[in-house]
Amino acid sequence: METEEIEFFLEFVTLANVANVDDLADNRYHHFVYEDHFNLHLVGMVRAQSSFQKLKDVCRHYEMREGIDIDSVMGEHERRTVSSRQYFIGKGLSTDEAQAAAFALSFYTGTRSEACNRGASLVARQANGQALESTTRDELNEAAIILYYLVKALSFIPYYWGYVTRACQLTDDELKLYSPGCLITWIQFSSSKKGRRAADNSTFEYRNTHFKIYSLTGRPIKEFSNYPEEDEVLFLPHSTFFVFKHELSYHGTQHTIYMRQIEMGLCQWSILWVDDNIYNPSWENKRHMEAAAARELNLNVHFIPKSSTDGALSFLRSPFGQRLKNRDTFRIVTDMNRENDYPERRTECVRDSSDRNSRKFNDLKKSAEN
């Protein structure tokens, strides 16, 4: 799953195969989220009303339920906030924003993550133009501030590149969606555990589906979590995955689905970044990608990482690359010295290397223009 070559299959993917164009348009409009407007819409909803105190008031409302000592629960969130806020202050947030970011993560990792996921789904639907009932709009307006600070907090946490596992209970109809070669977008926040094994918890262990995923933009939140032993990696809404294996075991009752997280540029701003060291964990430009995600929450900049010219050209030939290449919000950033493209010629002269790199750049430019 960690090999980038699996993404060459995108070149042969069809965006949709629906006979009735009206049905396709309706599905895209109301259910399938192709364009990622999540952050932009979220910021617009809460920009003028966000504060740490407002966040606490809303979270308190969600935590209030029968048999719960609300003061004890809120006190637990406050203690977690005190232990986590310094991280976000160190990232340049004000004390109020740092406390709100830490509190939102505590709320999510406590007992109320379903409130965040419900809110994320509503934001995604409204951002794509779906009309909501008045009671649902009220729910969305309440949840928006939690989502805002949760997204803000996650934007300051580095990407995790590596294996994660997620356990779910899926219906037969849902399982049919996960066929090899399919692309899946999860529009809600999605929790997973770092590593190749599911969490050692009876709640997860006996679910009928285990996802084995190679993460590219999941955020490790162990040090901010109320349950650090779960070693959680959290995917933001609109994370997309390529399914390349679906196995059955235990007489067909247990499903293991292998997926690689990928980026296809299904958003307003996309950058195809080509560098032979792009998947090196110590690569300095990884921090630039993460910084771009944190700079402005109302601008979703998605990076499409490729480590070779062949990988970049394959993406540009795919339906997703064809969709992007004529847009004025699409850019290509390419390293001019990618030794992995021609390893047998690494010892040749600098001038020849420069000529080859110029040809690689021209290949990318020509493909984008065509």
Image (cartoon, rainbow, N blue to C red):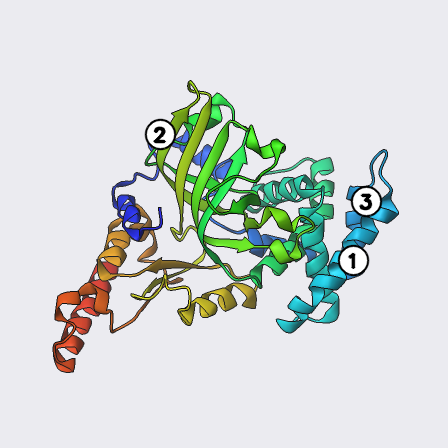
Where disc 3 sits, the SS reads helix
Three-letter amino acid code at disc 1? Arg
Label 3 crowd (10 A; few <14 / some 14-19 / many >=20)? few
Residue 140 % position (x, y) = 69, 44
Residue position marked by numbered label 2 in the rendering: 18
Quadrant holding the C terminus: bottom left
Amino acid type, mark 3: His
Q: Is residue 261 visible?
A: yes
Q: Which residue is mark 3?
A: 61
Q: Could you say which is closer to the camera, residue 221 or residue 25?
A: 221
Instruction: Classify 10 Å Cα crowding around label 2: few (below 14), some (14-19), many (20 and above).
Output: few
Q: Looking at the rendering, which quadrant does residue 302 occupy?
A: bottom left
Q: Are marks 2 and 1 in contact (CB under 8 Å)?
A: no
Q: Which residue is mark 1?
A: 79
Q: Position of residue 279 (x, y in %)?
A: 36, 61
Residue shown at 34%/34% (left/top)?
A: 180
The amino acid beneath tag 2 is Val
Q: Secondary structure at mark 1?
A: helix
